[in-house]
Image (cartoon, rainbow, N blue to C red):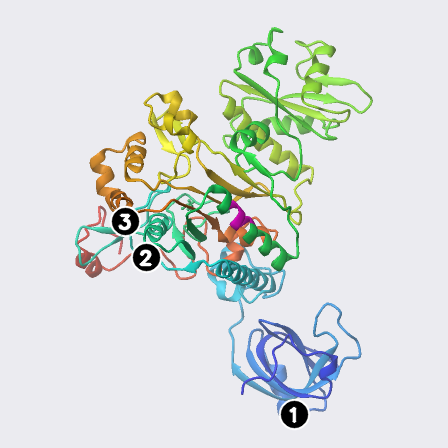
Amino acid sequence: MYRTHTCGELRAENKGQKVTLAGWVQKARKLGGMTFIDLRDRYGITQLVVEADAPAKLVETATSLGREFVIQATGEVLERQSKNEKLPTGDIEIKVSEIKVLNKAAIPPFTIEDNSDGGDDLRMKYRYLDLRRGPLKESLTLRHRLAHEVRNYLDAKGFMEIETPYLIKSTPEGARDFVVPSRMNPGEFYALPQSPQTFKQLLMVAGYDRYFQIVRCFRDEDLRADRQPEFTQIDCEMSFVEQEDVLGTFEGMMRSLFKNVLGVDIPNPLPRMSWFDAMDKYGSDKPDIRFGMTIHEITDAVKGKGFSVLDDAAYVGAIAVPGAAEYTRKQLDELTEWVKRPQVGAKGLIYIKLSADGSIKSSIDKFYSPEEIKAIADKVEARPGDLIFVMSGPAKRKVQTMLGVLRIEMGNRLGLRNPKEFAPLWIVDFPLLEWDDETQRFYAMHHPFTAPKPEHEKWFYSNAKEDLERVCANAYDFVLNGTELGGGSIRIHNADMQKRMFEVLGISPEDAEYKFGFIINAFKFGAPPHGGLAFGFDRVCALFGGSDSIRDYIAFPKNNQGRDVMIDSPSRIDQEQLDELQIDLKSAPEA
Ligand code: ASP
């Protein structure tokens, strides 16, 4: 037997017991002839002591231990004279009678402690060492607990976990596919699933009316901090349901995760907001409702005073930033530069300061009388001490989106976004389609399997652009603290309607048949009404852990270039492999 206990287990009540522990040497230090060793495993750290009068061989072994050596130590549990309150095992230590080195270790490239001295790249290269550190252990433990709770909850509700294939045909969810060449079918390719969307719908046709899967999905997108080329979804689908049934079921799931994992009660029922309200008030379809600072339209209040920037705008909106009236000129200039960055895209920033003493100062004093500025401030519901920001432009949604980005930034700067405070909500009533000026065509706002609301079907079958723009869907997103954690919809389950959808999206009948013939066909064989959703599991983990980086919650993530620097992938393959796949590279790989 390698061990009787783990390194996180022993307490004062174990005093006097003879125990054997196994683990990694976090550090060993000598103090007045005695050697103290911090022994670590997944469960914690226990202090070992080799006394000065221990047999010479034992003392010698103890002093020869390096960081990260794997050892086995046997000894007696003693109550410590000076307790360490920071460690759960801090009341005891082990008086060692025997140490066996199970394996030596090279000097680690960074310190394996909660606050490591290793940079990001180095820690990614030696991820297996990084994973020994406390914070990552906590993240993976949280992830495991959440997955376990999800399975418990869904199993209790009658959901079956069913695996769907990874080698499939492209399912459009708006991103590029990763493709895999088929050796047995030269010239042909599989696609890795962006989500199991079509398969879960086929499972509904097959009669498995409550399906879920904690499943890997693949999207070949440019990466950001909260994106990974492979990521995990909690993917779910139900038959014979309306939107209300889906929302109720998954609100319940989230409630049980919050309660059982974090001990947090979230509102019951959860608030809901229409997509239109979210855009109008928060300038985002994933509003952070932990703080106010909502957007107000002031188009009518600012027109006709000779200020052409606002006179010419189709939409003028504003937010009131609480208590920021004392912002200095320098801070305002810096913010103006900030909104002009391409990521925000504003031309400039108009401000109005409502000082606590009642005085008003603005960047538009030339054009507006104090009364007119006061009227604007009233529209924005600003109070003395607030700073108002005004933005304008030719397209309402674009201005609202810019104000939304500024709102979040001000929320961050003012410390209004506490990661320990949770404000989930549903966004509902999404438009079904989104017009793209550049390509002059409609795109599905969620995906092409989403059904129009039954009461909007008349517009769905119209060919007028204005009608199609009005069609809404029973589509919904679960949003937490400004992040979209999940989303789904009630689906099309009728072959003709699905064909119409492809037509609206500008996909020719031949193309639709080639790409999606299988699902259109399946709908002819008794497809039940159905709907579902998927949660981004990595993001759920990160937000529950109070972080905005999903990488810390994935055991072996990719870096920002989509590379796994630990195993050095992607990498070239042999000419022989290429030949077998009958693939010619456009440019030959360098030797
Ligand atoms: N397949 C969708 C997604 O990955 C979710 C859904 O509609 O169920 O976003």
Q: Earlier in the sequence, mark 2 or mark 1?
A: 1
Q: Mark 2 touching mark 1, by CB under 8 A?
A: no
Instruction: Give the residue at mark 1.
Output: 56
Q: Secondary structure at mark 1?
A: helix
Figure check: 568 above or below 301: below
User: Would you say the beta carbon of the disc 2 residue lies within 8 angstroms of ligand 1?
Assistant: no
Q: Nearer the viewer, mark 2 or mark 1?
A: 2
Q: Mark 3 touching mark 2, by CB under 8 A?
A: no
Q: Amino acid at mark 2?
A: Pro
Marking on residue 165: 2
Q: Main secondary structure of the magenta part?
A: helix
Identify the residue at image location x=28%, y=31%: 503
Marking on residue 169: 3
* Residue 107 at x, y percent in the picture: 54, 71
Q: Amino acid at mark 3?
A: Lys
Quarter of image, ligand 1: top left
* Residue 211 at x, y percent in the picture: 41, 55
The furthest residue to the bottom: 55
Identify the residue at image location x=72%, y=24%: 382
* Residue 38 at x, y percent in the picture: 65, 75
Q: Residues within 10 Å of mark 1 (few under 14, many from 20)?
A: few
Q: Earlier in the sequence, mark 3 or mark 1?
A: 1
**Distance from label 2 to label 1 (Cα)?**
61 Å
**Distance from label 3 to label 1 (Cα)?**
68 Å
Q: Quadrant of the N terminus?
A: bottom right
> Left of 221 or right of it: where is 118?
right
Pick whichever, 211 or 260, lies toward us: 211
Q: Secondary structure at mark 2?
A: loop
Figure check: 468 above or below 288: above
Pick whichever, 14 or 486, lies toward us: 486
Identify the residue at image location x=52%, y=66%: 129
Figure check: 8 above or below 476: below
